[in-house]
């Protein structure tokens, strides 16, 4: 793929997302946001358009989108409804990670056969039954940042596992059919390599949704808490064979960039709104403000920031691969940081530039602003952690000690 020109296939997929977004999702977004309710109607539309099977490989009757294609579609969805795009990320990436990404990883013949058998089941559920998958990883400790094993544990029993633990901020809580849970195999002194990735049926005995979700932004993600109490999970629920998620996280780091396209879409939406507003094209607010030089400068600043952000986004998604070279990996952190921070900055500038009438709740800008604030908080690649990694990895090579000279 040329980083700056989508393929014909990508253009078709993006056009489907654009049609749904413009005609269906955008008009519904304010209501879902106000109610903090899950966009079920949007998901019915995504199913009908077959986008829920976007990343299911073609040989399993999906649309077979690769990493870059997924990112382009996700960014387009984000333009129209951030919460739909963000939750769609959790669902679509359950298929992307177990599909195209997993194909790049090393597995023994037995592991590969086991993976093939299990993912066929998951893909059948998505394609034939319209099942939706979530990705509840966060627990509030160090695990979601990749710094410690997950506290949620799975004990091996006949035919599968017994799962117990608690997840916070689980987007699609109460809406997904399956929760793709990252947990640790219950054994003495477990390490990150003992991470398991299991799809737990939402209606399995012992699964409970708890707490409220009344958040600043991304309200329609309904990211409530999940509690698992000794839940029986059959072996075929494995989304990856034991040990393979850990390999994926090390060798396919761009897998964690998949949250960023949503925010790239929000950045575009904030820019589009501002231009339309200043030109007097927003229904109900016909005041033309483009004649003022300060507005023109602000529009120019927004354009520059948007294009800088998009350039890094497109380059990074085009070079994503297994075992990326160090500059590619570092660029992925830089892209995540840039997209998340610049999107919020663009929304801030959009409100300042358009003015008071533009931040009323009857218009989408204040929602874009609130949604945009969430991007930098998302583990494992929060804005802070991207800077941490960049700071360390630009200055040190793997294996070099990074505590030299401390205290001098
Ligand atoms: C809208 C929204 C939807 C979400 N949906 C999901 C979801 O579907 N699934 C899911 O698993 N999670 C989801 N999350 C959770 C998200 O990924 C984070 O886990 C959550 O925001 C972390 O909460 P916290 O900031 O309180 O975490 P804390 O762990 O308290 O981290 C606070 C900050 O400290 C820094 N930090 C954390 N750990 C380290 C470390 N080891 N070293 C140095 N600095 C560190 C980071 O910069 C982090 O931002 C969602 C979050 C939001 C906002």
Image (cartoon, grey):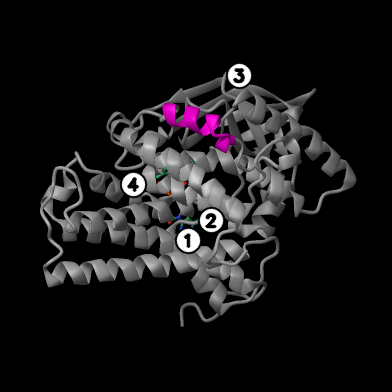
Distance from Cα at disc 3 to Cα at disc 4 = 32 Å
Front position in the image: 248 or 232? 248
Label 3 neighbour load within 10 Å: few <14, some 14-19, many 20+ = few
Locate the N terminus and report the quarter of the image it occupies: bottom right
Tell which residue pokes out farthest to the right in this image. Answer: 109
Label for residue 371?
4
Disc 4 crowd, CA 10 A, few/some/many (<14, 14-19, 20+): many
Q: In this view, does 5 lie to the left or right of 79?
A: right
Q: Earlier in the sequence, mark 3 or mark 2?
A: 3
Nearest to N terminus: mark 1 or mark 2: 2
Q: Nearer the viewer, mark 1 or mark 3?
A: 1
Seen from the viewer's position, the closer of residues 46 and 15 is 15
What is the distance, in whole Å, between disc 3 and disc 2 at their CAs? 31 Å
Residue 198 falls in which quadrant of the image?
top right
Q: Is residue 47 magenta?
A: yes
Determine contact: label 2, label 4, CB under 8 Å: no
Residue occupied by mark 3: 204
**In this rendering, does residue 107 appear at all?**
yes
Q: Tell me which corner region of the image, top left, top right, bottom left or bottom right, holds residue 272.
A: bottom left
- Is label 3 in contact with label 2 (beta carbons under 8 Å)? no
Q: The residue tagged with tag 3: helix, strand or loop? A: loop
- Would you say 376 lies left or right of 48 here? left
Q: Position of residue 71 (x, y in %)?
A: 54, 53
Residue at the image point whose x is 60% and y is 41% from the top: 54
Query: Residue 180 location in percent, x, y?
Result: 60, 35
Q: How much space separates mark 4 and mark 1, taking CA atoms?
A: 16 Å
User: x%, y% of residue 127?
Assistant: 65, 30
Looking at marks 3 and 4 on the same chain, the residue that comes earlier in the sequence is marked by 3
């Amino acid at each position: 793929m040329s980083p700056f020109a989508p393929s014909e296939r990508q253009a078709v997929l993006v056009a489907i997302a654009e049609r749904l977004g413009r005609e269906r999702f955008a008009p519904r977004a304010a209501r879902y946001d106000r109610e903090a309710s899950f966009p079920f109607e949007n998901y019915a539309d995504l199913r009908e358009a077959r986008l829920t099977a976007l990343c299911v490989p073609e040989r399993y009757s999906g649309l077979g989108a690769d990493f870059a294609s997924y990112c382009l579609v996700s960014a387009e969805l984000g333009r129209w409804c951030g919460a739909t795009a963000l939750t769609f990320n959790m669902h679509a990436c359950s298929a992307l990670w177990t599909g195209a990404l997993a194909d790049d990883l090393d597995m023994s013949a037995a592991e590969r056969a086991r993976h093939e058998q299990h993912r066929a089941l998951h893909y059948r559920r998505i394609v034939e039954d319209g099942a939706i998958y979530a990705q509840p990883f966060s627990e509030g400790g160090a695990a979601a940042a990749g710094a410690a094993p997950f506290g949620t544990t799975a004990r091996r029993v006949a035919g599968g596992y017994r799962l117990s633990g608690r997840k916070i901020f689980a987007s699609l809580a109460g809406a997904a059919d399956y929760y793709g849970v990252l947990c640790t195999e219950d054994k003495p002194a477990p390490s990150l390599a003992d991470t398991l990735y299991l799809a737990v049926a939402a209606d399995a005995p012992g699964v409970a949704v708890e707490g409220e979700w009344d958040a600043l932004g991304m309200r329609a993600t309904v990211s409530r808490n999940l509690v698992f109490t000794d839940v029986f999970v059959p072996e075929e629920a494995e989304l990856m064979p034991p040990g393979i998620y850990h390999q994926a996280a090390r060798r396919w780091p761009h897998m964690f960039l998949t949250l960023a396209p949503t925010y790239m879409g929000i950045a575009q939406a904030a820019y589009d709104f501002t231009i339309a507003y200043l030109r007097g094209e927003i229904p109900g607010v016909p005041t033309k403000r483009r004649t003022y030089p300060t507005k023109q400068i602000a529009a120019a600043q927004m354009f520059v920031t948007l294009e800088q952000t998009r350039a890094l986004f497109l380059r990074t998604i085009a070079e994503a691969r297994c075992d990326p070279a160090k500059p590619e990996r570092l660029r992925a952190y830089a892209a995540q940081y840039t997209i998340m921070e610049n999107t919020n900055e663009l929304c801030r500038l959009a409100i300042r530039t358009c003015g008071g009438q533009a931040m009323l709740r009857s218009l989408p800008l204040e929602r874009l602003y609130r949604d945009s604030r969430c991007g930098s908080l998302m583990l494992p690649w929060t804005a802070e952690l991207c800077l941490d990694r960049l700071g360390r990895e630009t200055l040190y090579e793997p294996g070099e000690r990074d505590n030299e000279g401390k205290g001098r």
